[in-house]
Image (cartoon, rainbow, N blue to C red):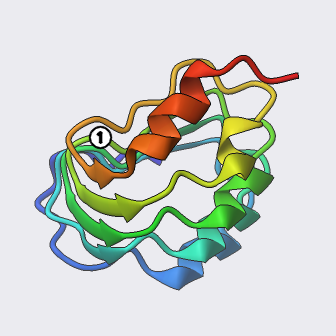
C-alpha cells in the first residue's frame, strides 16, 4: 500500500496489523503522529516499510524484528527516541536501514556499525 504525501494527520491505526498480505507499506511524507504501533510486527510478508518524513514519536517497537522478509526500512526524519531494538539489527534480509534525523541514542549507531554473526 502506497500512501505517500497524502496529508494523513492521524496516528497509524493498530488495526494495520490485520493487513497480513501487505508486502509494501509506504507512508512517507505525511503528518502521521503518535507512536509506531507494535502491531506492524504482524506483517510477516512485508518487504518494504517507509515511515520517513512524518512526526512519529517514541521508541521503535521490538516487534518489528518479526519482519524477517524486510529489505527496506526507512524511519528517518521523525521524532523517534531511545535505542534501536537488536531484533531489527538482526533482520536477515535488511539492506540499508535509515534512521537519520531522529533522537535515537548513539548506542544504536555503534550496533549498526558492528558486524553481526
Q: Nearer the viewer, residue 99 or 67?
A: 99
In the image: residue 45, left or right of residue 17: right
**Residue 72, visible in the rendered structure:** no
- Residue 73 x %, y %: 50, 36
Q: Which quadrant holds the C terminus?
A: top right
Q: Nearer the viewer, residue 93 or 48?
A: 93
- Residue 50 x %, y %: 41, 42
Displayed quadrant of residue 88: top right
In the image: residue 26, left or right of residue 43: left
Q: Secondary structure at mark 1?
A: loop
Residue drawn at the location 20% of the way across and 41% of the way down = 101
Q: How busy is the neighbourhood of tag 1: few (under 14 within 10 Å), some, or many (20 plus)? A: many
Residue drawn at the location 34% of the way across and 63% of the way down = 81
Q: Nearer the viewer, residue 89 or 109?
A: 109
- Residue 104 x %, y %: 35, 52
15 over 77 or under it: above or below: below
Residue drawn at the location 57% of the way across and 67% of the way down = 61
Q: Which residue has dot 1 on it?
A: 76
**Residue 3, visible in the rendered structure:** yes
In the image: residue 69, left or right of residue 64: right
In the image: residue 69, left or right of residue 114: right
Q: Tally the marks.
A: 1
106 over 31 or under it: above or below: above
Amino acid at each position: 500500500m502506497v500512501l505517500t504525501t497524502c496529508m494523513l494527520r492521524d496516528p497509524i491505526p493498530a488495526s494495520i496489523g490485520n493487513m497480513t498480505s501487505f508486502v509494501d507499506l509506504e507512508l512517507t511524507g505525511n503528518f502521521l503522529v503518535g507512536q509506531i504501533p507494535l502491531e506492524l510486527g504482524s506483517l510477516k510478508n512485508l518487504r518494504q516499510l517507509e515511515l520517513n518524513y512524518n512526526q512519529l514519536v517514541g521508541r521503535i517497537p521490538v516487534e518489528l524484528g518479526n519482519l524477517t522478509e524486510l529489505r527496506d526500512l526507512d524511519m528517518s526524519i521523525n521524532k523517534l527516541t531511545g535505542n534501536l531494538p537488536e531484533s531489527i539489527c538482526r533482520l536477515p534480509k535488511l539492506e540499508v536501514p535509515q534512521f537519520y534525523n531522529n533522537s535515537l541514542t548513539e548506542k544504536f549507531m555503534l550496533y549498526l556499525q558492528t558486524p553481526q554473526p
